Image (tube, rainbow, N blue to C red):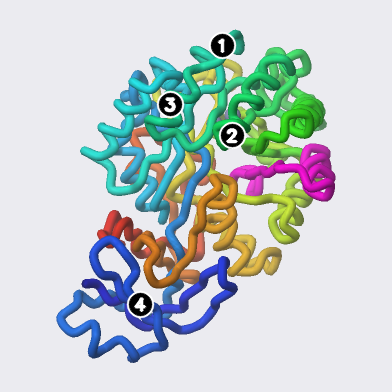
């Protein structure tokens, strides 16, 4: 048994924000009670002192890239899972753009078998929508669902045609799987490396307009309405896209979205000739960023997701134009969320929801800190000062725009099925 003592329990599902002790027995939460009430029952239990710390349901990351199989020089399931645990995540959803692509049950099973051997956190794979994510024919979605995928996506590229998207969505509706789309109209994107605007002109870099994303979101919402399938928009970055999601929700459609910490913390004004600021979708305007933050607070946004995208230094340390898109993000995600809390732009309970009950709802599951639930817990400090050093990351890659940034607040323990996956 494990007694997590004297913490401030935040459980968005029930609205709880109160001092509570949490007793863990085996893989489950055995009891949640006022401080001291469990002392007799917890006799002999290991004690974790959570005084002045927040005890939350386990964080879920809906969007990451673990690169295994095929990209092990940038990340493996083992190193990615360790970085995730250090970031407070108890479950992460790796995208299927591995080599080979996770578009059939044998790849899904291989990922899950590897995860069972080396990962301290839960790995919930996302399967490809189309074979090879090539946008031509359907992937083996039903077989992958049986093997354990939680959603489908061709992330890295959009689902190319409305016709294919319709087929995928008809199929996924029947299987009760969300379709996660990387929304991008490629005809507006060609050759772009950042957001189109004053800064792209100043730097002389090819830009893509915000409409490259929102045009695709508009199409997707209409196909979601046509099919009745749950559409989830990956890494939404533009105000116009968010307005489409907001309108779809108001009409009662099953449409949800996530935003990344880097789109919340940075804008295109931060972009320099430094590939750590190159990601897709690119960093957006200040107006977009403010709209995303408002969307976190008012419920238009469902989740904060990292889009953790490791690239080994040899790939990323090249000219801006030639570098691959993407940044690592597990270890700085919570601290980025807390920056918004400290700035008064987001309540702490809502921030926790965006990492827990919010992403859980997208996956059609519940995430509660309550008796009988799996003992997946994230314990964090809201005020611990620290500096993120990419060189010290558990990830194999170093491509973070937050290298050297000072943060306030950090994960202190990550507990998965009653076991410490990380302890600071
Ligand atoms: Zn993407
Ligand atoms: Zn991605």
- Residue farthest toward the top in the current orientation of the protein: 136
Q: Secondary structure at mark 3?
A: helix
Quadrant in which residue 22 is drawn: bottom left
Please check the rendered image and state whether residue 247 is part of the magenta-colored stretch, yes or no: yes
Residues marked 1 and 4 touching at CB (< 8 Å): no
Observer-side mark, 1 or 4, equals 4
Residue 190 appears left or right of 381: right
Observer-side mark, 2 or 3, equals 3
Observer-side mark, 4 or 2, equals 4
Q: CA distance from mark 1 to mark 2?
A: 27 Å
Q: Indicate which disc residue 134 carries.
A: 1
Observer-nearest of 328 and 63: 63
Residue 89 appears left or right of 396: right
- Residue farthest toward the left in the current orientation of the protein: 44
Q: CA distance from mark 2 to mark 3?
A: 34 Å
**Residue 50 placement (x, y as % from top left):** 36, 76
Magenta highlight: main SS: helix
Q: Earlier in the sequence, mark 4 or mark 2?
A: 4
Residue at numbered disc 3: 144
Q: Is mark 2 within 8 Å of ligand 2?
A: no
Read off the magenta span.
239-266
Please check the rendered image and state whether residue 391 is part of the magenta-colored stretch, yes or no: no
Residues marked 2 and 3 touching at CB (< 8 Å): no
Residue at numbered disc 4: 31
Observer-nearest of 275 and 191: 191
Observer-side mark, 1 or 3, equals 3
């Amino acid at each position: 048994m494990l007694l997590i003592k004297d913490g401030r329990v935040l459980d968005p599902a029930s609205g709880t924000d109160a001092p509570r002790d949490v007793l863990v027995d085996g893989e489950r939460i055995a009891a949640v009670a006022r401080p001291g009430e469990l002392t007799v029952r917890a006799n002999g239990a290991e004690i974790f002192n959570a005084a002045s710390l927040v005890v939350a349901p386990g964080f879920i990351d809906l969007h990451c890239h673990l690169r295994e199989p095929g990209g092990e020089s940038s990340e493996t399931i083992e190193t990615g899972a360790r970085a995730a645990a250090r970031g407070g995540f108890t479950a992460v959803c790796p995208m299927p753009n591995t080599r080979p692509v996770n578009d059939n049950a044998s790849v899904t099973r291989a990922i899950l078998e590897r995860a069972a051997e080396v990962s301290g956190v839960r790995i919930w794979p996302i399967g490809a929508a189309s074979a090879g994510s090539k946008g031509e024919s359907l992937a083996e979605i039903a077989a992958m669902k049986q093997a354990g995928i939680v959603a489908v996506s061709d992330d890295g590229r959009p689902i190319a045609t409305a016709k294919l998207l319709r087929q995928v969505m008809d199929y996924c509706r029947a299987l009760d799987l969300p379709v996660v789309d990387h929304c991008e109209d490629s005809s507006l994107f060609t050759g772009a490396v950042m957001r189109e605007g004053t800064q792209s002109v100043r730097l002389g870099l090819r830009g893509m307009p915000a409409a490259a994303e929102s045009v695709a979101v508009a199409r997707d919402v209409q196909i979601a309405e046509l099919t009745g399938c749950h559409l989830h928009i990956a890494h939404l970055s533009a105000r116009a896209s968010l307005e489409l999601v907001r309108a779809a929700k108001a009409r009662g459609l099953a449409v949800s979205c996530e935003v990344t910490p880097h789109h919340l913390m940075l804008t295109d004004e931060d972009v320099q000739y430094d590939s750590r600021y190159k990601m897709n979708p690119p960093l957006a305007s200040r107006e977009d960023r403010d709209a995303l933050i408002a969307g976190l607070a008012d419920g238009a946004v469902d989740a904060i997701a990292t889009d953790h995208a490791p690239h080994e230094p040899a790939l990323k340390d090249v000219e801006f134009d030639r570098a691959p898109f993407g940044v690592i993000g597990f270890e700085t995600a919570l601290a980025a969320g807390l920056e918004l809390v400290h700035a008064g732009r987001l309540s702490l309970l809502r921030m926790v929801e965006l990492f827990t009950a919010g992403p859980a709802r997208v996956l059609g599951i519940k995430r509660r800190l309550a008796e009988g639930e799996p003992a997946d817990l994230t314990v964090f400090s809201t005020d611990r000062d620290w500096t993120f050093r990419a060189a010290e990351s558990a990830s194999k890659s170093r491509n973070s725009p937050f290298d050297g940034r000072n943060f306030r607040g950090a994960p202190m323990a990550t507990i998965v099925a009653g076991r410490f996956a990380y302890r600071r």
